[in-house]
Image (spheres, coloured by chain):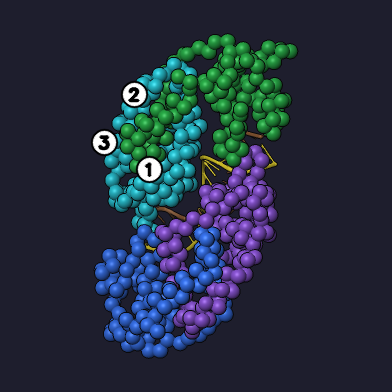
Chain colours: A cyan, B green, C blue, D purple, E brown, F yellow
Amino acid sequence: MILLDYKSSKPIYEQIIEQIKLNVMKQYLKPGDAIPSVRKLALELEITPGTVAKAYQELERQQIIETIRGKGTFIAGEIELKPDEKKVLEIKKRLQTELMELKMMGYSKNMVVDLVVGIYEEMCVC
Amino acid sequence: MILLDYKSSKPIYEQIIEQIKLNVMKQYLKPGDAIPSVRKLALELEITPGTVAKAYQELERQQIIETIRGKGTFIAGEIELKPDEKKVLEIKKRLQTELMELKMMGYSKNMVVDLVVGIYEEMCVC
Amino acid sequence: MILLDYKSSKPIYEQIIEQIKLNVMKQYLKPGDAIPSVRKLALELEITPGTVAKAYQELERQQIIETIRGKGTFIAGEIELKPDEKKVLEIKKRLQTELMELKMMGYSKNMVVDLVVGIYEEMCVC
Amino acid sequence: MILLDYKSSKPIYEQIIEQIKLNVMKQYLKPGDAIPSVRKLALELEITPGTVAKAYQELERQQIIETIRGKGTFIAGEIELKPDEKKVLEIKKRLQTELMELKMMGYSKNMVVDLVVGIYEEMCVC
DNA sequence: GTGGTCTAGACCACG
DNA sequence: GTGGTCTAGACCACT
Protein backbone atom coordinates (compact mmCIF):
# COMPACT_ATOMS: atom_id res chain seq x y z
CA MET A 1 0.00 0.00 0.00
CA ILE A 2 2.83 2.33 0.79
CA LEU A 3 5.95 2.17 -1.29
CA LEU A 4 9.07 3.98 -0.22
CA ASP A 5 12.07 4.98 -2.23
CA TYR A 6 14.79 4.70 0.38
CA LYS A 7 17.36 6.12 -2.01
CA SER A 8 15.35 9.23 -2.70
CA SER A 9 16.51 12.51 -1.26
CA LYS A 10 12.90 13.16 -0.30
CA PRO A 11 12.56 12.48 3.43
CA ILE A 12 10.87 9.21 4.27
CA TYR A 13 8.27 10.91 6.43
CA GLU A 14 7.28 13.11 3.51
CA GLN A 15 6.97 10.09 1.26
CA ILE A 16 4.61 8.52 3.76
CA ILE A 17 2.53 11.68 3.92
CA GLU A 18 2.30 11.81 0.17
CA GLN A 19 1.45 8.16 -0.28
CA ILE A 20 -1.36 8.33 2.22
CA LYS A 21 -2.74 11.48 0.65
CA LEU A 22 -2.61 9.74 -2.71
CA ASN A 23 -4.44 6.74 -1.32
CA VAL A 24 -7.11 9.04 0.06
CA MET A 25 -7.45 10.82 -3.24
CA LYS A 26 -7.73 7.60 -5.16
CA GLN A 27 -10.32 6.55 -2.61
CA TYR A 28 -8.39 3.45 -1.64
CA LEU A 29 -8.70 4.97 1.81
CA LYS A 30 -12.05 6.40 2.79
CA PRO A 31 -13.19 8.53 5.72
CA GLY A 32 -13.28 6.45 8.87
CA ASP A 33 -10.89 3.81 7.57
CA ALA A 34 -8.19 2.82 10.00
CA ILE A 35 -4.60 3.20 8.94
CA PRO A 36 -1.84 1.00 10.36
CA SER A 37 -0.54 1.82 13.82
CA VAL A 38 2.73 3.66 14.08
CA ARG A 39 4.58 0.55 15.16
CA LYS A 40 2.99 -1.73 12.60
CA LEU A 41 3.77 0.53 9.68
CA ALA A 42 7.27 1.07 11.02
CA LEU A 43 7.83 -2.69 11.07
CA GLU A 44 6.34 -3.07 7.62
CA LEU A 45 8.47 -0.35 6.09
CA GLU A 46 11.51 -1.30 8.15
CA ILE A 47 11.95 2.16 9.56
CA THR A 48 11.80 3.48 13.10
CA PRO A 49 8.48 4.34 14.71
CA GLY A 50 9.54 7.94 15.21
CA THR A 51 9.64 8.53 11.48
CA VAL A 52 6.13 7.15 11.01
CA ALA A 53 4.93 9.18 13.98
CA LYS A 54 6.29 12.34 12.41
CA ALA A 55 4.37 11.64 9.22
CA TYR A 56 1.16 10.90 11.11
CA GLN A 57 1.46 14.05 13.17
CA GLU A 58 1.83 16.17 10.07
CA LEU A 59 -1.14 14.44 8.45
CA GLU A 60 -3.18 15.10 11.56
CA ARG A 61 -2.14 18.74 11.51
CA GLN A 62 -3.43 18.88 7.96
CA GLN A 63 -6.63 17.22 9.12
CA ILE A 64 -6.25 14.31 6.73
CA ILE A 65 -6.26 11.82 9.58
CA GLU A 66 -7.52 11.76 13.16
CA THR A 67 -6.06 9.89 16.06
CA ILE A 68 -8.23 8.53 18.80
CA ARG A 69 -6.37 8.01 22.02
CA GLY A 70 -5.49 4.44 22.71
CA LYS A 71 -7.52 3.33 19.72
CA GLY A 72 -5.58 4.15 16.63
CA THR A 73 -5.48 6.43 13.65
CA PHE A 74 -8.21 6.98 11.08
CA ILE A 75 -8.91 8.87 7.88
CA ALA A 76 -10.68 12.09 8.79
CA GLY A 77 -14.38 12.40 8.21
CA GLU A 78 -14.45 15.50 6.13
CA ILE A 79 -11.48 16.86 4.36
CA GLU A 80 -12.01 20.51 3.70
CA LEU A 81 -10.82 22.22 0.60
CA LYS A 82 -9.45 25.55 1.61
CA PRO A 83 -7.56 27.42 -1.04
CA ASP A 84 -4.60 29.15 0.55
CA GLU A 85 -3.21 32.03 -1.47
CA LYS A 86 0.23 31.74 0.05
CA LYS A 87 0.45 28.02 -0.56
CA VAL A 88 -0.66 28.39 -4.17
CA LEU A 89 2.13 30.89 -4.70
CA GLU A 90 4.69 28.44 -3.36
CA ILE A 91 3.33 25.71 -5.57
CA LYS A 92 3.45 28.01 -8.58
CA LYS A 93 7.12 28.66 -7.92
CA ARG A 94 7.87 24.95 -7.73
CA LEU A 95 5.79 24.26 -10.83
CA GLN A 96 7.74 26.90 -12.69
CA THR A 97 10.96 25.11 -11.85
CA GLU A 98 9.66 21.85 -13.23
CA LEU A 99 8.08 23.39 -16.33
CA MET A 100 11.33 25.13 -17.07
CA GLU A 101 13.16 21.82 -17.02
CA LEU A 102 10.58 20.37 -19.37
CA LYS A 103 10.81 23.33 -21.70
CA MET A 104 14.58 22.97 -21.82
CA MET A 105 14.08 19.42 -22.94
CA GLY A 106 11.94 20.62 -25.81
CA TYR A 107 8.47 20.18 -24.36
CA SER A 108 5.96 22.43 -26.10
CA LYS A 109 3.01 23.97 -24.32
CA ASN A 110 0.69 21.27 -25.61
CA MET A 111 3.02 18.49 -24.57
CA VAL A 112 3.22 19.97 -21.09
CA VAL A 113 -0.56 20.26 -20.85
CA ASP A 114 -0.96 16.64 -21.99
CA LEU A 115 1.57 15.53 -19.40
CA VAL A 116 -0.15 17.45 -16.62
CA VAL A 117 -3.62 16.24 -17.58
CA GLY A 118 -2.31 12.70 -17.65
CA ILE A 119 -0.89 12.99 -14.15
CA TYR A 120 -4.04 14.65 -12.85
CA GLU A 121 -6.37 12.03 -14.23
CA GLU A 122 -4.23 9.17 -13.04
CA MET A 123 -4.40 10.63 -9.58
CA CYS A 124 -8.11 10.39 -9.06
CA VAL A 125 -11.19 8.43 -9.78
CA CYS A 126 -13.09 11.33 -11.26
CA MET B 1 18.33 40.40 -12.49
CA ILE B 2 18.70 37.69 -9.94
CA LEU B 3 16.35 37.69 -7.00
CA LEU B 4 17.00 35.40 -4.07
CA ASP B 5 14.69 34.32 -1.31
CA TYR B 6 17.05 33.80 1.59
CA LYS B 7 14.32 32.35 3.75
CA SER B 8 13.33 29.73 1.24
CA SER B 9 14.12 26.13 1.93
CA LYS B 10 15.46 25.94 -1.60
CA PRO B 11 19.26 26.22 -1.48
CA ILE B 12 20.66 29.54 -2.60
CA TYR B 13 22.86 27.92 -5.23
CA GLU B 14 19.84 26.22 -6.78
CA GLN B 15 17.99 29.50 -6.87
CA ILE B 16 20.87 31.04 -8.78
CA ILE B 17 20.90 28.18 -11.29
CA GLU B 18 17.20 28.54 -11.81
CA GLN B 19 17.21 32.29 -12.19
CA ILE B 20 19.95 32.18 -14.80
CA LYS B 21 18.15 29.47 -16.72
CA LEU B 22 15.01 31.59 -16.58
CA ASN B 23 16.89 34.58 -17.92
CA VAL B 24 18.18 32.48 -20.79
CA MET B 25 14.73 31.19 -21.55
CA LYS B 26 13.23 34.65 -21.54
CA GLN B 27 16.11 35.67 -23.82
CA TYR B 28 17.27 38.34 -21.42
CA LEU B 29 20.53 36.45 -21.70
CA LYS B 30 21.58 35.28 -25.15
CA PRO B 31 24.36 32.95 -26.30
CA GLY B 32 27.70 34.66 -25.92
CA ASP B 33 26.50 37.14 -23.32
CA ALA B 34 28.82 37.56 -20.40
CA ILE B 35 27.58 36.86 -16.91
CA PRO B 36 29.11 38.38 -13.78
CA SER B 37 32.20 36.83 -12.26
CA VAL B 38 31.78 34.66 -9.21
CA ARG B 39 33.09 37.37 -6.93
CA LYS B 40 31.03 40.14 -8.44
CA LEU B 41 27.80 38.21 -8.24
CA ALA B 42 28.64 37.13 -4.70
CA LEU B 43 29.11 40.74 -3.67
CA GLU B 44 25.93 41.78 -5.45
CA LEU B 45 23.84 39.08 -3.80
CA GLU B 46 25.61 39.40 -0.46
CA ILE B 47 26.48 35.75 -0.26
CA THR B 48 29.76 33.88 -0.11
CA PRO B 49 31.63 33.23 -3.38
CA GLY B 50 31.57 29.49 -2.74
CA THR B 51 27.83 29.44 -3.19
CA VAL B 52 27.99 31.25 -6.51
CA ALA B 53 30.82 28.99 -7.65
CA LYS B 54 28.71 25.95 -6.88
CA ALA B 55 25.90 27.32 -9.04
CA TYR B 56 28.23 28.13 -11.93
CA GLN B 57 29.80 24.69 -11.78
CA GLU B 58 26.44 23.05 -12.10
CA LEU B 59 25.42 25.37 -14.94
CA GLU B 60 28.64 24.54 -16.74
CA ARG B 61 28.02 20.85 -16.25
CA GLN B 62 24.63 21.34 -17.85
CA GLN B 63 26.33 23.26 -20.67
CA ILE B 64 24.26 26.36 -20.09
CA ILE B 65 27.35 28.48 -19.54
CA GLU B 66 31.01 28.27 -20.51
CA THR B 67 33.99 29.57 -18.65
CA ILE B 68 36.92 30.81 -20.65
CA ARG B 69 40.01 31.14 -18.49
CA GLY B 70 41.16 34.67 -18.13
CA LYS B 71 38.16 36.03 -20.00
CA GLY B 72 35.12 35.27 -17.94
CA THR B 73 31.92 33.29 -18.03
CA PHE B 74 29.44 33.30 -20.89
CA ILE B 75 26.13 31.85 -21.94
CA ALA B 76 26.84 28.77 -24.05
CA GLY B 77 26.54 28.95 -27.81
CA GLU B 78 23.86 26.44 -28.42
CA ILE B 79 21.75 24.82 -25.82
CA GLU B 80 20.74 21.40 -26.95
CA LEU B 81 17.33 19.93 -26.26
CA LYS B 82 17.87 16.40 -25.12
CA PRO B 83 14.81 14.72 -23.76
CA ASP B 84 15.96 12.46 -20.96
CA GLU B 85 13.51 9.71 -20.08
CA LYS B 86 14.85 9.32 -16.58
CA LYS B 87 14.69 13.00 -15.87
CA VAL B 88 11.16 13.27 -17.20
CA LEU B 89 10.13 10.53 -14.82
CA GLU B 90 11.58 12.42 -11.89
CA ILE B 91 9.83 15.57 -12.96
CA LYS B 92 6.54 13.69 -13.29
CA LYS B 93 6.88 12.49 -9.71
CA ARG B 94 7.48 16.01 -8.46
CA LEU B 95 4.65 17.36 -10.59
CA GLN B 96 2.34 14.77 -9.09
CA THR B 97 3.20 16.01 -5.62
CA GLU B 98 2.34 19.57 -6.57
CA LEU B 99 -0.83 18.66 -8.47
CA MET B 100 -2.00 16.63 -5.49
CA GLU B 101 -1.65 19.67 -3.25
CA LEU B 102 -3.64 21.74 -5.73
CA LYS B 103 -6.32 19.08 -5.99
CA MET B 104 -6.63 19.00 -2.21
CA MET B 105 -7.25 22.72 -2.29
CA GLY B 106 -10.12 22.19 -4.67
CA TYR B 107 -8.42 22.82 -8.01
CA SER B 108 -10.25 21.12 -10.86
CA LYS B 109 -8.50 19.75 -13.93
CA ASN B 110 -9.31 22.87 -15.92
CA MET B 111 -8.07 25.16 -13.19
CA VAL B 112 -4.82 23.24 -13.05
CA VAL B 113 -4.40 23.41 -16.81
CA ASP B 114 -5.04 27.14 -16.76
CA LEU B 115 -2.50 27.59 -14.02
CA VAL B 116 0.11 25.55 -15.85
CA VAL B 117 -0.47 27.30 -19.17
CA GLY B 118 -0.17 30.62 -17.38
CA ILE B 119 3.16 29.68 -15.88
CA TYR B 120 4.45 28.28 -19.16
CA GLU B 121 3.54 31.34 -21.19
CA GLU B 122 4.92 33.72 -18.64
CA MET B 123 8.18 31.85 -18.82
CA CYS B 124 8.98 32.49 -22.45
CA VAL B 125 8.81 34.97 -25.21
CA CYS B 126 6.92 32.65 -27.50
CA MET C 1 -26.11 14.95 29.44
CA ILE C 2 -22.50 14.05 28.91
CA LEU C 3 -20.98 14.82 25.57
CA LEU C 4 -17.59 13.43 24.67
CA ASP C 5 -15.21 14.43 21.95
CA TYR C 6 -13.44 11.21 21.14
CA LYS C 7 -11.02 12.96 18.82
CA SER C 8 -9.93 15.46 21.42
CA SER C 9 -6.48 15.19 22.87
CA LYS C 10 -8.08 15.63 26.27
CA PRO C 11 -8.41 12.20 27.90
CA ILE C 12 -11.91 10.78 27.92
CA TYR C 13 -11.86 10.34 31.70
CA GLU C 14 -11.00 13.99 32.17
CA GLN C 15 -13.84 14.99 29.88
CA ILE C 16 -16.23 12.99 32.03
CA ILE C 17 -14.95 14.66 35.20
CA GLU C 18 -15.37 18.05 33.65
CA GLN C 19 -18.83 17.43 32.29
CA ILE C 20 -20.10 16.22 35.63
CA LYS C 21 -18.59 19.19 37.40
CA LEU C 22 -20.24 21.43 34.84
CA ASN C 23 -23.59 19.78 35.44
CA VAL C 24 -23.19 20.33 39.13
CA MET C 25 -22.31 23.96 38.63
CA LYS C 26 -25.27 24.54 36.37
CA GLN C 27 -27.37 22.83 39.02
CA TYR C 28 -28.58 20.20 36.60
CA LEU C 29 -27.17 17.87 39.21
CA LYS C 30 -27.89 18.69 42.86
CA PRO C 31 -26.53 17.28 46.09
CA GLY C 32 -27.99 13.85 46.67
CA ASP C 33 -28.83 13.22 43.03
CA ALA C 34 -27.86 9.81 41.75
CA ILE C 35 -25.50 9.51 38.82
CA PRO C 36 -25.37 6.49 36.52
CA SER C 37 -23.41 3.44 37.55
CA VAL C 38 -20.03 2.91 36.02
CA ARG C 39 -21.35 0.21 33.72
CA LYS C 40 -24.42 2.11 32.64
CA LEU C 41 -22.49 5.24 31.77
CA ALA C 42 -19.86 3.17 30.00
CA LEU C 43 -22.55 1.58 27.84
CA GLU C 44 -24.18 4.92 27.18
CA LEU C 45 -20.93 6.57 26.13
CA GLU C 46 -19.66 3.49 24.33
CA ILE C 47 -16.43 3.39 26.22
CA THR C 48 -14.86 0.83 28.53
CA PRO C 49 -15.94 0.77 32.18
CA GLY C 50 -12.37 1.31 33.31
CA THR C 51 -12.38 4.79 31.86
CA VAL C 52 -15.60 5.72 33.65
CA ALA C 53 -14.30 4.22 36.88
CA LYS C 54 -11.18 6.33 36.64
CA ALA C 55 -13.29 9.47 36.30
CA TYR C 56 -15.52 8.54 39.25
CA GLN C 57 -12.49 7.80 41.42
CA GLU C 58 -11.07 11.21 40.75
CA LEU C 59 -14.45 12.88 41.38
CA GLU C 60 -14.72 11.03 44.65
CA ARG C 61 -11.23 12.11 45.62
CA GLN C 62 -12.29 15.68 44.98
CA GLN C 63 -15.40 15.05 47.07
CA ILE C 64 -17.74 15.95 44.25
CA ILE C 65 -19.47 12.59 44.40
CA GLU C 66 -19.92 9.86 46.99
CA THR C 67 -20.25 6.16 46.45
CA ILE C 68 -22.45 4.20 48.82
CA ARG C 69 -21.78 0.51 48.53
CA GLY C 70 -24.77 -1.38 47.24
CA LYS C 71 -26.74 1.79 46.62
CA GLY C 72 -24.93 3.69 43.94
CA THR C 73 -23.13 6.93 43.34
CA PHE C 74 -24.43 10.37 44.31
CA ILE C 75 -23.55 14.03 44.14
CA ALA C 76 -21.90 14.94 47.43
CA GLY C 77 -23.87 16.83 50.04
CA GLU C 78 -21.88 19.96 50.31
CA ILE C 79 -19.12 21.00 48.05
CA GLU C 80 -16.64 23.10 49.91
CA LEU C 81 -14.91 26.06 48.41
CA LYS C 82 -11.30 25.81 49.40
CA PRO C 83 -9.02 28.20 47.64
CA ASP C 84 -5.74 26.42 47.08
CA GLU C 85 -2.82 28.75 46.45
CA LYS C 86 -0.84 26.11 44.63
CA LYS C 87 -3.71 25.19 42.38
CA VAL C 88 -4.43 28.83 41.55
CA LEU C 89 -0.83 29.22 40.48
CA GLU C 90 -1.13 26.26 38.13
CA ILE C 91 -4.33 27.65 36.70
CA LYS C 92 -2.70 31.04 36.19
CA LYS C 93 0.07 29.40 34.19
CA ARG C 94 -2.42 27.63 31.98
CA LEU C 95 -4.52 30.76 31.61
CA GLN C 96 -1.43 32.64 30.52
CA THR C 97 -0.86 30.11 27.77
CA GLU C 98 -4.39 30.56 26.47
CA LEU C 99 -4.38 34.35 26.79
CA MET C 100 -1.13 34.45 24.88
CA GLU C 101 -2.70 32.56 22.01
CA LEU C 102 -5.61 34.97 22.00
CA LYS C 103 -3.31 37.96 22.08
CA MET C 104 -1.39 36.58 19.11
CA MET C 105 -4.65 36.41 17.22
CA GLY C 106 -5.22 40.07 17.87
CA TYR C 107 -7.47 39.93 20.92
CA SER C 108 -7.31 43.14 22.93
CA LYS C 109 -7.67 43.22 26.69
CA ASN C 110 -11.31 44.17 26.42
CA MET C 111 -12.06 41.41 23.95
CA VAL C 112 -10.43 38.91 26.27
CA VAL C 113 -12.42 40.17 29.25
CA ASP C 114 -15.64 39.95 27.24
CA LEU C 115 -14.81 36.43 26.20
CA VAL C 116 -14.01 35.37 29.75
CA VAL C 117 -17.13 36.98 31.19
CA GLY C 118 -19.20 35.26 28.53
CA ILE C 119 -17.77 31.87 29.41
CA TYR C 120 -18.19 32.48 33.12
CA GLU C 121 -21.80 33.55 32.86
CA GLU C 122 -22.72 30.74 30.55
CA MET C 123 -21.30 28.35 33.08
CA CYS C 124 -23.66 29.09 35.91
CA VAL C 125 -27.17 29.97 36.79
CA CYS C 126 -26.21 33.13 38.59
CA MET D 1 16.00 33.66 29.12
CA ILE D 2 14.19 30.37 28.81
CA LEU D 3 13.18 28.58 31.98
CA LEU D 4 11.98 25.02 31.87
CA ASP D 5 10.01 23.09 34.38
CA TYR D 6 11.41 19.62 33.88
CA LYS D 7 8.88 18.17 36.29
CA SER D 8 5.90 19.58 34.45
CA SER D 9 3.69 17.26 32.47
CA LYS D 10 3.76 19.84 29.69
CA PRO D 11 6.19 18.65 27.04
CA ILE D 12 9.52 20.42 27.04
CA TYR D 13 9.22 21.39 23.41
CA GLU D 14 5.91 23.10 24.14
CA GLN D 15 7.47 24.97 27.02
CA ILE D 16 10.17 26.24 24.70
CA ILE D 17 7.58 27.36 22.16
CA GLU D 18 5.66 29.19 24.82
CA GLN D 19 8.64 30.88 26.37
CA ILE D 20 9.85 32.17 23.05
CA LYS D 21 6.39 33.45 22.15
CA LEU D 22 6.28 35.16 25.52
CA ASN D 23 9.65 36.76 24.92
CA VAL D 24 8.43 38.01 21.57
CA MET D 25 5.28 39.40 23.09
CA LYS D 26 7.18 41.17 25.85
CA GLN D 27 9.45 42.51 23.12
CA TYR D 28 12.53 41.02 24.71
CA LEU D 29 12.90 39.46 21.29
CA LYS D 30 12.28 41.68 18.29
CA PRO D 31 11.91 40.93 14.58
CA GLY D 32 15.26 40.02 13.10
CA ASP D 33 16.82 39.05 16.40
CA ALA D 34 18.75 35.82 16.34
CA ILE D 35 17.74 33.07 18.71
CA PRO D 36 20.23 30.48 19.96
CA SER D 37 21.15 27.65 17.64
CA VAL D 38 19.51 24.30 18.20
CA ARG D 39 22.70 22.85 19.65
CA LYS D 40 23.49 25.83 21.83
CA LEU D 41 20.06 25.98 23.39
CA ALA D 42 20.10 22.21 23.85
CA LEU D 43 23.36 22.45 25.76
CA GLU D 44 22.07 25.37 27.80
CA LEU D 45 18.86 23.63 28.76
CA GLU D 46 20.56 20.26 29.11
CA ILE D 47 18.20 18.55 26.72
CA THR D 48 18.79 16.86 23.40
CA PRO D 49 18.97 18.88 20.19
CA GLY D 50 16.01 16.98 18.75
CA THR D 51 13.68 18.45 21.32
CA VAL D 52 14.81 21.98 20.60
CA ALA D 53 14.56 21.30 16.87
CA LYS D 54 10.97 20.17 17.30
CA ALA D 55 10.10 23.40 19.08
CA TYR D 56 11.83 25.52 16.45
CA GLN D 57 10.07 23.72 13.63
CA GLU D 58 6.70 24.35 15.17
CA LEU D 59 7.55 28.00 15.73
CA GLU D 60 8.58 28.27 12.12
CA ARG D 61 5.34 26.67 11.02
CA GLN D 62 3.53 29.32 13.00
CA GLN D 63 5.69 31.95 11.32
CA ILE D 64 7.05 33.25 14.61
CA ILE D 65 10.61 32.51 13.55
CA GLU D 66 12.45 32.03 10.29
CA THR D 67 15.46 29.87 9.63
CA ILE D 68 18.06 30.83 7.13
CA ARG D 69 20.01 27.89 5.81
CA GLY D 70 23.42 27.54 7.33
CA LYS D 71 23.02 30.86 9.08
CA GLY D 72 20.72 30.38 12.00
CA THR D 73 17.26 31.12 13.30
CA PHE D 74 15.65 34.52 13.66
CA ILE D 75 12.47 36.18 14.89
CA ALA D 76 10.18 36.67 11.91
CA GLY D 77 9.79 40.10 10.41
CA GLU D 78 6.08 40.45 10.54
CA ILE D 79 3.90 38.36 12.73
CA GLU D 80 0.42 38.37 11.34
CA LEU D 81 -2.64 38.35 13.51
CA LYS D 82 -5.11 36.04 11.92
CA PRO D 83 -8.12 35.16 14.04
CA ASP D 84 -8.98 31.52 13.50
CA GLU D 85 -12.53 30.60 14.42
CA LYS D 86 -11.69 26.99 15.08
CA LYS D 87 -8.76 27.81 17.27
CA VAL D 88 -10.78 30.30 19.29
CA LEU D 89 -13.36 27.61 19.95
CA GLU D 90 -10.67 25.28 21.25
CA ILE D 91 -9.30 27.99 23.47
CA LYS D 92 -12.78 28.75 24.78
CA LYS D 93 -13.18 25.13 25.78
CA ARG D 94 -9.91 25.13 27.64
CA LEU D 95 -10.70 28.46 29.27
CA GLN D 96 -14.01 27.03 30.45
CA THR D 97 -12.14 24.22 32.17
CA GLU D 98 -9.92 26.64 34.02
CA LEU D 99 -12.71 29.07 34.91
CA MET D 100 -14.72 26.18 36.29
CA GLU D 101 -11.89 25.25 38.60
CA LEU D 102 -11.65 28.83 39.77
CA LYS D 103 -15.38 29.04 40.32
CA MET D 104 -15.28 25.88 42.40
CA MET D 105 -12.70 27.54 44.59
CA GLY D 106 -15.05 30.43 45.18
CA TYR D 107 -13.82 32.92 42.60
CA SER D 108 -16.55 35.42 41.70
CA LYS D 109 -16.89 36.89 38.24
CA ASN D 110 -15.06 40.03 39.29
CA MET D 111 -12.23 38.10 40.86
CA VAL D 112 -11.83 36.10 37.67
CA VAL D 113 -11.80 39.23 35.55
CA ASP D 114 -9.18 40.80 37.80
CA LEU D 115 -7.05 37.69 37.57
CA VAL D 116 -7.32 37.58 33.79
CA VAL D 117 -6.59 41.28 33.38
CA GLY D 118 -3.57 40.88 35.63
CA ILE D 119 -2.20 38.05 33.55
CA TYR D 120 -2.88 39.88 30.30
CA GLU D 121 -1.17 43.07 31.38
CA GLU D 122 1.83 41.28 32.80
CA MET D 123 2.22 39.59 29.45
CA CYS D 124 2.85 42.65 27.35
CA VAL D 125 4.35 46.06 27.31
CA CYS D 126 1.22 47.81 26.21
C1' DG E 1 -2.80 -2.55 22.48
C1' DT E 2 -2.40 2.77 21.07
C1' DG E 3 0.11 7.40 20.15
C1' DG E 4 3.26 11.09 22.41
C1' DT E 5 7.56 12.37 24.14
C1' DC E 6 12.33 12.11 24.86
C1' DT E 7 17.31 10.52 24.76
C1' DA E 8 21.82 10.22 22.72
C1' DG E 9 23.71 9.70 19.28
C1' DA E 10 24.53 9.82 13.84
C1' DC E 11 24.87 11.65 8.97
C1' DC E 12 23.73 15.04 5.53
C1' DA E 13 23.43 19.43 2.78
C1' DC E 14 24.17 24.17 3.13
C1' DG E 15 26.89 28.51 3.60
C1' DG F 1 29.19 26.72 11.89
C1' DT F 2 23.83 25.89 10.82
C1' DG F 3 19.28 23.12 10.70
C1' DG F 4 17.02 18.62 8.89
C1' DT F 5 16.56 13.82 9.09
C1' DC F 6 16.92 9.40 11.01
C1' DT F 7 18.03 5.44 14.22
C1' DA F 8 17.13 2.47 18.06
C1' DG F 9 15.78 2.49 21.81
C1' DA F 10 13.05 4.11 26.24
C1' DC F 11 9.04 5.65 29.26
C1' DC F 12 4.53 7.53 29.76
C1' DA F 13 -0.63 8.07 29.74
C1' DC F 14 -4.72 6.39 27.80
C1' DT F 15 -8.21 2.79 26.38
**Residue type at mark 3?**
Val
Circle 2 crowding by C-alpha within 10 Å: few under 14, some 14–19, many from 20 = few
Tag 1, which secondary structure?
A: loop
Whole-percent x and y of residue A65?
Answer: 37, 49
- Whole-angstrom CA distance, mark 2 to mark 1, is 22 Å
Residue sticking out furthest to the front = B125
Circle 1 crowding by C-alpha within 10 Å: few under 14, some 14–19, many from 20 = some
**Where A43 falls versus A32 (above or below)?**
above
Mark drawn on residue A125? 3
Mark drawn on residue A114? 2
Q: Residue at x 71, y 25 (%)?
A: B40
Front of the two marks 3 and 2: 2
Mark drawn on residue D74? none
Relative depth, front residue between D70 and D108: D108
Q: Residue at x 47, y 13 (%)?
A: B81
Whole-percent x and y of residue D95?
Answer: 46, 70
Tag 2, which secondary structure?
A: helix
Circle 3 crowding by C-alpha within 10 Å: few under 14, some 14–19, many from 20 = few
**Where B14 falls versus B82 (above or below)?**
below
Whether residue A56 is visible, yes or no, is no
**Residue type at mark 2?**
Asp
Front of the two marks 1 and 3: 1
Reading the image, the residue beneath label 1 is B105
Q: Residue at x 56, y 38 (%)?
A: B9
